[in-house]
Amino acid sequence: MKYQEYSAEDFAQDPFFCQWVLCPDQNTQKFWEKWRKENPDKEKELQKGCKIIQVIHGKEKEIPQEKIDHLWKAINDKIEAIEKPAIRTIADKTFQNQWYNIAAAIVLIAIGVFYFFNRPEVIQAKHGEKLSHVLPDGTEISLNAGTTLTYNKKKWGKSRMVHFDGEGFFRVTKGEPFLIKTQNGTVLVLGTSFNIYSRNAKLSVECFTGKVQVDSKDAAFSALLTPGKGVKMTEKTTRKYGFDTQSQKGWRFGSFFYDDIPLTEVLDEIERQYDITIETQTDISQRKYSGEFDKNELKSTLDMVCLPMELNYEVINAQKVIIRK
Amino acid sequence: MKDIHLWEQFKNGDRQALETIFRLHIKVLYKYGNKFSANRQLVEDCIQDLFLELWGNKKTLGGTDAIRPYLFSALRRKIIRHLQKHHKMINDHIEPESYCFVLEENGEELLINHEKNQEKNQQLSIAMKQLSTREREAIYLKYYQHLSYEEIAQTMEVNYQSVRNLIYRALKRLRTSL
């Protein structure tokens, strides 16, 4: 019988035991009384289990019915208000549809004109290049290869907000909150310096000075980073970690460091750094790379990555590399 | 009616179905929400938001055969986000999972039959202080709301084994403090 092995914690989790403690009936009463007699050595654990359940079991005060009705009415009224314009007769609709179309066209033209005069600044670091950019507030940004930064100069006075895709190092001037929107989540800071990486479905942020708040796209996760702290978010996981802010490593210094990172991600970085295309003729989707390379010469970089992974490569021309088994 | 059918009806735009869902779960949702914050207005606002969003997004929502944990986790996220926004920028270190979960109550929230229960409440209060926020929440969901381990996992957005560990750890700590 399994109960012989039970500790108090196990008893407290057992539904049949809980039933006996909280609302005993003939069946449970009979079973447990008998079991107690037969297992006097377990009496202490059983008592403890009882005690735990009795203490943590609780009933709460019910909320009054008026409150429930009131809450529902508030919700229903709001839905009502939202849906009202949709209730219209069909004749009405076709007639109004024409006006809708005209109105829509006018709105579109207006948006177009507005957009033309308010078109955003787009700063792009192409493959093979690194860029520095200074925003109107004096914030300095270094952009790694294959990175796009978009912001609106006209609206800059009102709010500091940029759209960002790729990897970059930000040195943010102190002032109003500074917001970075990426496809994987948002980063909110006051005045700090930090590194951000947002590519594919991965967002990672490392804080060097000040404080940085990172929120995932669906707002399920949020992290506040202090200097020396970083966070990595993918669709499924979030991981916080520490790093050395003094280290002269990283893409800004031309060195790339990986710890158990998908090989595809590493090859993507090489593509961006050297502005080449890498074709893989063997399945590497599940493989991970730990190691580092410096950006100096393509062949030595490929050696650093391919040799430990037991892969062969061939440089076809200045734009193309093939990787095989 | 089964959850899965009720949910389908609601997704097809049946407001009666939404009301049924609301009335089936509002009591426990409200109580659960109140454990995160004693501010009833905030909890009520979050619940309102939650149901309005459900209605607004009904076309794009996925199916579910377990409505309660779905609502629990949605409300939980909402309230925690709400509370964090208040603290954001003011507080120094907000961990991603920082929130309060208060179980031991001043006797108003929990039904107490005086005397005998006064003592019990005191014990509960002392015992609960030994637990971490997450352990308290897991214990609450299991022993007050009677959710299954799977449902608790879904609500707290962690995996099944973590829930088992949380509860086991909590019980172990309670055992030594009683």
Image: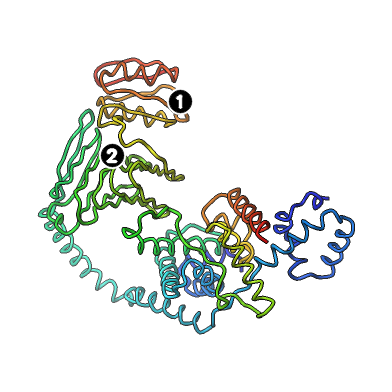
Q: Which mark is residue A283?
A: 1
Instruction: Point out the residue furthest to the bottom here.
Output: A66
Q: Earlier in the sequence, mark 2 or mark 1?
A: 2
Q: Is residue A188 above or below residue A239?
A: below
Element type at mark 1: loop
Residue B100 coordinates in the image, percent (x, y): 48, 62
- Name which residue type carries label 2: Gly
Classify 10 Å Cα crowding around label 2: few (below 14), some (14-19), many (20 and above): many
Q: Which mark is residue A168?
A: none
- Chain of the residue that carries numbered disc 2 in the rendered image: A
- Name which residue type carries label 1: Asp
| Quadrant in the picture for residue B129 | bottom right
Of A132 and A81, nearer the camera is A132
Residue appearing at x 42%, y 30% in the figure:
A259
Q: CA distance from mark 2 to mark 1?
A: 25 Å
> Which residue is labeled 2 in the image?
A166
Residue B111 coordinates in the image, percent (x, y): 62, 77
Q: Is residue B8 left or right of residue B143?
A: left
| Quadrant in the picture for residue A197 | top left
- Chain of the residue that carries numbered disc 1 in the rendered image: A
Q: Is residue A107 left or right of residue B61?
A: left
Quadrant of the image containing the N terminus of chain B: bottom right
